[in-house]
Amino acid sequence: MGRAFEFRKARKMKRWSSMAKVFTRIGKDIVMAVKSGGPDPTTNSRLRAVIQNAKAANMPKVNVENAIKKASSKDQEDYKEMVLEGYGMHGVAVLVECTTDNNNRTVANVRSYFTKCNGNLGTNGMLDFIFERKCIFKIANTPGVDLEELEFELIDFGADDVFLDEEHDQINIYGEFTAYGAIQKFLEEKGLELLHADFERIPTDTKKLSEADAADLDKLLEKLDEDDDVQNVYHNMVIE
């Protein structure tokens, strides 16, 4: 497929947060999964994937169980997903994925971060031409898995790229956004060890900045990272 380099490079354009933030994000993912498909992971494929992500992030099992119980409660407020888009300094595109129980608060906060950092929050869909949404699966690189054969099989299920991540000794699979369910089902039926499943935004166009200019954008990225409503932040900056 020939796109492995693009995906390896794009992975570094996602803003990763602290462990505490990761746990908060997974907790919200559990709530949304339970609300949409019930608390039983055997019948809720979305919840199964989130639980696996929690395990990969070393989230304590008791935390996961408590999150599921809390999500099943009628007192648990619903979270809504929203995407906010804009430009930071030096024309860098910034896409912010949020999960919130108060849309007005989240929009106001994110808008203030952009404004304070000399950026501008724009309209939904304005960055569709820059970011391509993909699903990603990470599976264990176990003996007996033929990478070439696996890639060939996965093409029929919507996979774009399959490659070995030597740094983490795992196999990464990227596919079309709509192929998530089909790929997950294929991997489970094959009995392959799923380490992580998620969605990512892959920039199709990049903005090259010097280290000094990149430091300007980091001020915005740090403010976004600190907001509890923000799940993921993507940008198309590349440091020269």
Image (spheres, rainbow, N blue to C red):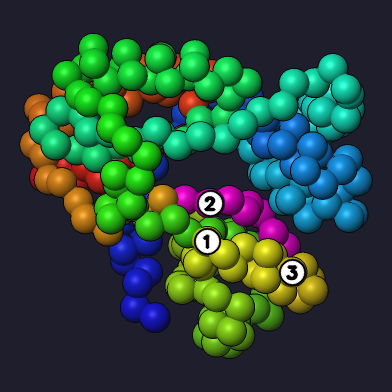
Residue in the image at 88% along x and 22% along y: 74
**Amino acid type for the residue under numbered disc 1:** Phe
| Left or right, residue 39 beside residue 185 | right
Q: CA distance from mark 1 to mark 3?
A: 15 Å
The earlier-in-sequence mark between 1 and 2 is: 1
Of circles 1 and 2, which is in front? Answer: 1
Q: Count neighbours of disc 3 (C-alpha within 10 A) and say few if under 14, some if 14 to 19, many if 20 or more.
A: few
Q: Which residue is mark 1?
A: 177
Rendering coords of residue 139 (x, y %): 63, 62
| Label number found at residue 71 | none
Up-down relation of residue 144 to residue 226 (above or below): below
Q: Which residue is mark 3?
A: 185
**Amino acid type for the residue under numbered disc 3:** Lys
Which is the main secondary structure of the residues drawn in magenta? strand
- Looking at the rendering, which quadrant does residue 13 occupy? top left
Q: Are marks 1 and 2 in contact (CB under 8 Å)?
A: yes
Residue range of the region highlighted in magenta in the rendering:
192-200
- Looking at the rendering, which quadrant does residue 67 occupy? top right
Rendering coords of residue 227 (x, y %): 47, 17
Up-down relation of residue 130 to residue 239 (above or below): below
| Left or right, residue 87 beside residue 80 | left
| Left or right, residue 113 beside residue 63 | left
Q: Nearer the viewer, residue 12 or 38?
A: 38
For the question of whether residue 72 can be seen, the reply is: yes
| Label number found at residue 199 | 2
Q: Is residue 199 in the magenta section?
A: yes
